Amino acid sequence: MKSLREQFEDDYMAVSVPANNKDGFQIKYVYYGPWYIWELPEKELKRKKGLKRKKGLFAGVSLGSLLLYVLAGVQYCLANSQAIVTVAGILALCAHVFEIFHAFEFLFAKYRTSRLTYRNVNRSLRTAPAIRGACLLTASVFSGLSMVWNGWEIRSFFAAADYLICAAAAFWIFAEYRMIPFTTEKNENPVLEGANWTGEKE
């Protein structure tokens, strides 16, 4: 797997462009790789007001489910005292960190985005929500079983319900993101026109 430096070198090149300084030029790192564009079918664009709304929903649902998860996790109850619920919750939280970070990266990504941004978002939103959902579903099931083993407890019930809702939110993000098609477009950056390649890479 390529390092961030190597990925940067694949898509950026140092070019000299005219500038109002004593040298008459400056070195600028320009993206010359293909543009990546997330797209929605025309009918969905009209019905849901486009990709921007869906991107906002992903970020909002991810953030909202994090708050709900914290509310469930701090409940002092028999369900949360089980080792398997604790471990599943910790794994879910780790996956959620990646998910929520890249959900907001997706939200603020431009219409045409670089290969590195696309890969970061795509890799995270195709895996992290599924891992989080599976872990939270496990936590919900064992929280419910704790009431079967130890008797009814209102806090355990709410913890189980919260974990289940968070799992559903994670699977929704996972499924909805995978339905968004993408295309690539040739980079016609005007800065590249007439610029002199320096051959330098960083």
Image: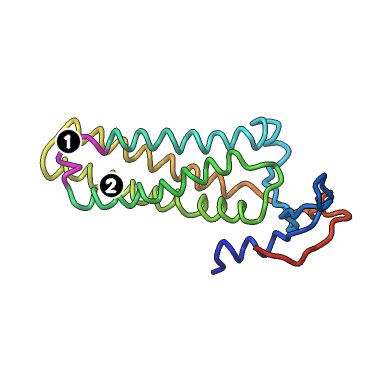
Q: Tag 2's secondary structure?
A: helix
**Residue 21: x %, y % from top left:** 80, 47
Categorize mark 2 by other alpha carbons within 10 Å: few (<14), some (14-19), many (20+). Answer: many
Q: Where is the C terminus found, in terms of image quarters?
A: bottom right
Please report the residue visible at 36 percent of the width from the left and 33 percent of the height from the top.
67
Does 178 appear above or below 166? below
User: Which residue of the protein is positioned furthest toward the bottom in this rendering?
Assistant: 1
- Residue position for label 2: 139
- Residue position for label 1: 76
Instruction: Residue 68: name its quadrant.
Output: top left
Number of numbered discs on residues: 2
- Give the amino acid at mark 2: Ala
**Residue 9: x %, y % from top left:** 66, 64
Please report the residue visible at 25 percent of the width from the left and 32 percent of the height from the top.
158
Compared across the picture, whether 129 is left or right of 159 comes to right
Q: Earlier in the sequence, mark 2 or mark 1?
A: 1
For residue 136: magenta?
Answer: no
Q: Tag 1's secondary structure?
A: loop
Please report the residue visible at 60 percent of the width from the left and 39 percent of the height from the top.
108
* Label number found at residue 142: none
For residue 74: magenta?
Answer: yes
- Give the amino acid at mark 1: Tyr
Does 103 appear above or below 193? above
Task: Assess whether mark 1 and mark 2 are in contact (beta carbons under 8 angstroms).
Answer: no
Please report the residue visible at 76 percent of the width from the left and 67 percent of the height from the top.
199
Range of magenta residues: 73-81
